[in-house]
Image: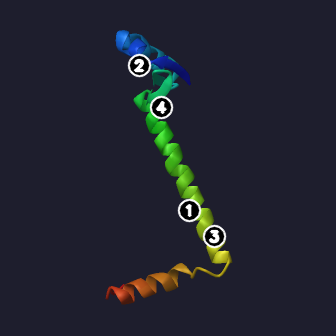
Amino acid sequence: MTDHSLTDFQDNPKYFVEQIKETQKPIVLTVNGKAELVIQDAIAYQKLVERLDYAESVAAIRQGITEFEQGKGKPARFALAELRKKHDISS
């Protein structure tokens, strides 16, 4: 990731858009030397979101396995039966 001033970006946005598309890397825009914004290509952003979703799913599954191993869970068939009974749903 590279830093550039917001003014530089405003002066030549086409150049920065081309750079982002070419490198697939985000650019940090600064104001008075402080990072203020990050811009990136939509495809790279979507990949980042998908990777984050995947990582969160894996973490949740691991947590569920750990809790089950610690006796904090119950088999799915029992949990589903309880939900059906609670919500008066016949299977």
The C terminus is located in which quarter?
Answer: bottom left
Element under label 4?
Answer: helix
Q: Tell me, yes or no, whether the two marked residues, 1 and 2, touch with CB atoms within 8 Å.
A: no
Q: Which residue is mark 1?
A: 60
Element under label 2?
Answer: helix
Q: Of residues 1 and 50, which is closer to you in this image? A: 1
Question: How packed is label 2: few (under 14 Cα within 10 Å), some, or many (20 or more)?
Answer: some
47 up-or-down from 26: above or below: below
Q: Quadrant of residue 29?
A: top left
Element under label 3?
Answer: helix
Element under label 1?
Answer: helix
Q: Residue furthest front?
A: 32
User: Mark 4 against mark 2, which lies toward the viewer?
Assistant: 2
Question: How packed is label 3: few (under 14 Cα within 10 Å), some, or many (20 or more)?
Answer: some
Comes first in the chain, label 4 or label 3: 4
Comes first in the chain, label 1 or label 3: 1
Name the amino acid type tagged 2: Leu
Q: Which residue is mark 3?
A: 65
Residues at marks 2 and 3, CA–CA distance in whole angstroms: 47 Å
Q: Which residue is mark 4?
A: 44
Name the amino acid type tagged 1: Ala
Q: Which residue is mark 2?
A: 6
Residue 61 is situated, as x and y percent measured from the top left of the image, at: 58, 63
Comes first in the chain, label 4 or label 2: 2
